[in-house]
């Protein structure tokens, strides 16, 4: 029910904007949203379930941004995963959302890294 309320308050963004971590962070911080619905949206955004969903959505977008298995492997190695494990993880047959919730992205794209990049407050 609260999710439908959130959808009613979405400002106009380009098509596919919520597949891009940049636009997700813009939406969360948007002044236009604060003016449209007041502080109630920020109370809702502080809810742990939505924060959890946003973090997973950001991880999902990053995983799909890498596209090819070799890019995924190189990126995972840069993030500190051992080469053999990175190879296995990059060739996983799990879907993007399942990867975002798994240790593959949870251990590499941590909350600290997301905060450092400016995606999450």
Image (cartoon, grey):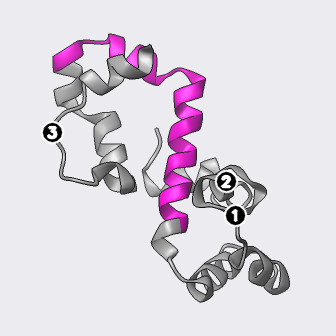
Alpha carbon separation for disc pair 3 and 2 = 29 Å
Give the residue at mark 1.
94
Label 2 element class: helix
Which x, y percent locates residue 120? 47, 43
Query: Which quadrant, please, contains the N terminus?
Result: top left
Q: Judge by depth and name the residue closer to the eye, 94 or 106.
A: 94
Residue at 67% from the left image edge and 53% from the top image edge: 98
Dot 1 alpha-carbon crowd within 10 angstroms: few under 14, some 14 to 19, many 20 or more: few
Residue 81's place in the image compared with 108, above or below, is: below
Q: Is residue 47 left or right of residue 3?
A: right
Give the residue at mark 2.
98
Give the residue at mark 3.
12
Going from N to C along the chain, the mark reached first, 3 or 2, is 3
Q: Is residue 15 left or right of residue 18?
A: left
Hey, which quadrant is residue 109 in on the image? bottom right
Nearest to viewer (mark 3 / mark 2)? 2
* Disc 1 to disc 2: CB gap under 8 Å: yes
Which x, y percent locates residue 101? 68, 49
Nearest to viewer (mark 1 / mark 3)? 1
Residue 2's place in the image compared with 30, above or below, is: above
Residue 28's place in the image compared with 106, above or below, is: above
């Amino acid at each position: 029910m609260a999710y439908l309320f959130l959808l009613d308050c979405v400002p106009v963004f380009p098509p596919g904007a919520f597949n891009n971590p940049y636009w997700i962070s813009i939406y969360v911080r948007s002044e236009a949203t604060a003016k449209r619905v007041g502080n109630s949206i920020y109370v809702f955004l502080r809810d742990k379930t939505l924060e959890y969903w946003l973090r997973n959505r950001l991880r999902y977008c990053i995983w799909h941004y890498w596209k090819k298995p070799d890019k995924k492997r190189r990126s995972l190695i840069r993030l500190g995963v051992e080469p053999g494990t990175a190879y296995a993880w990059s060739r996983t047959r799990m879907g993007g959302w399942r990867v975002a919730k798994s240790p593959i992205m949870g251990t590499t794209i941590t909350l600290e890294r997301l905060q450092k990049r400016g995606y999450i407050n």
